[in-house]
Image (tube, rainbow, N blue to C red):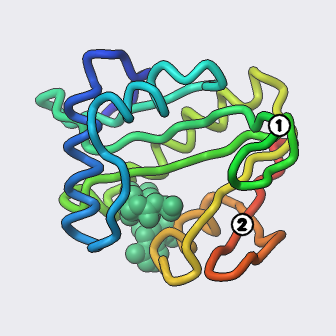
Amino acid sequence: MATRIASLDDAPAMSRVLREIIAHTGRDRPSDEAFVTRQYIANPASIRCTVAIDDEGVVLGFQSLVRAEAGNRYEVPVGWGIIGTHISPRARRKGVGSALFRSSRKAAGQSELENIDAYIGADNQSGLRYYEAMGFQTYRTPEGIVQKVYTVG
Ligand SMILES: CC(C)(COP(=O)(O)OP(=O)(O)OC[C@H]1O[C@@H](n2cnc3c(N)ncnc32)[C@H](O)[C@@H]1OP(=O)(O)O)[C@@H](O)C(=O)NCCC(=O)NCCS
């Protein structure tokens, strides 16, 4: 497994990962290629979007790190990072999320971010445990949500 910065050519594979997660969790959400391109790969607020690939180059998952802008829907303070992690159910618990965070953490340091927000469903046990393992701590709990912060330091 390896990680690299996402390119526009990754949109179909990243869309597939989102559809696999939807099929697995039953939680619907946007997943088409145009959304992936706009939201993750070519987002003007993006700091880094990293994909993880297997030995054959198949995309296993991705992680986006964007800079929080005024009026962001998570109500994250302007200038913080906002992170999102999406890993195929086929590839879970094999260190993919950890490898992706090493890439995002590096980009956060290079961009002089001080804090990174993770916005997680309160019922998403694997998401909660994952971000805790990466060093995030709960700072806010709007209804049904847990927001965790990572201090880049
Ligand atoms: C949550 C998610 C990102 C974890 O990714 P992953 O590649 O499985 O994570 P890793 O294998 O790198 O695990 C790192 C650590 O996180 C913790 N962890 C991850 N999944 C866990 C789970 N299901 N239960 C308990 N701990 C878990 C563990 O401490 C793990 O270390 P260990 O395996 O040595 O015990 C992945 O399952 C995913 O993309 N889920 C769907 C989307 C999602 O929920 N995104 C995040 C919240 S919005």
Task: Spot the residue most to the front.
Answer: 71
- Mark 2 surroundings within 10 Å by alpha-carbon count, few (fewer than 14), some (14 through 19), many (20 or more): many
At label 1, which amino acid type do we have?
A: Ala
* Image-quarter location of ligand 1: bottom left
Residue 44 location in percent, x, y?
61, 19
In this rendered view, identify the residue nearer to me: 60 or 144.
144
Kindly identify the residue that appears in the image at 34 percent across and 52 percent down.
87
At label 2, which amino acid type do we have?
A: Gln
Q: Secondary structure at mark 1?
A: loop
- Quarter-of-image position of residue 25: bottom left
Marked residue nearer the N-terminal end (2 or 1): 1
Kindly identify the residue that appears in the image at 65 percent across and 33 percent down.
66
Which one is in front in this view, the residue at disc 2 or the one at disc 1? 1
* Residue beneath disc 1: 70
Residue 116 is left or right of residue 139, and the answer is left
In this rendered view, identify the residue nearer to me: 133 or 27.
27
Residue 100 is left or right of residue 119, and the answer is left
Q: Is residue 135 above or below residue 17?
A: below
Q: Is residue 57 above or below residue 120?
A: above
Check the picture and name the quadrant holding the C terminus.
top right
- What is the C-alpha distance between the residues marked 2 and 1? 18 Å
Q: Is mark 1 within 8 Å of ligand 1?
A: no
Q: Which mark is residue 147?
A: 2
Q: Secondary structure at mark 2?
A: strand
Residue 145 location in percent, x, y?
64, 75
Kindly identify the residue that appears in the image at 72 percent across and 32 percent down.
67
Residue 29 is left or right of residue 13, and the answer is right
Residue 10 location in percent, x, y?
27, 24
Task: Spot the residue most to the left.
Answer: 56
- Mark 1 surroundings within 10 Å by alpha-carbon count, few (fewer than 14), some (14 through 19), many (20 or more): few
Residue 95 is left or right of residue 69, and the answer is left
- Quarter-of-image position of residue 126: bottom left
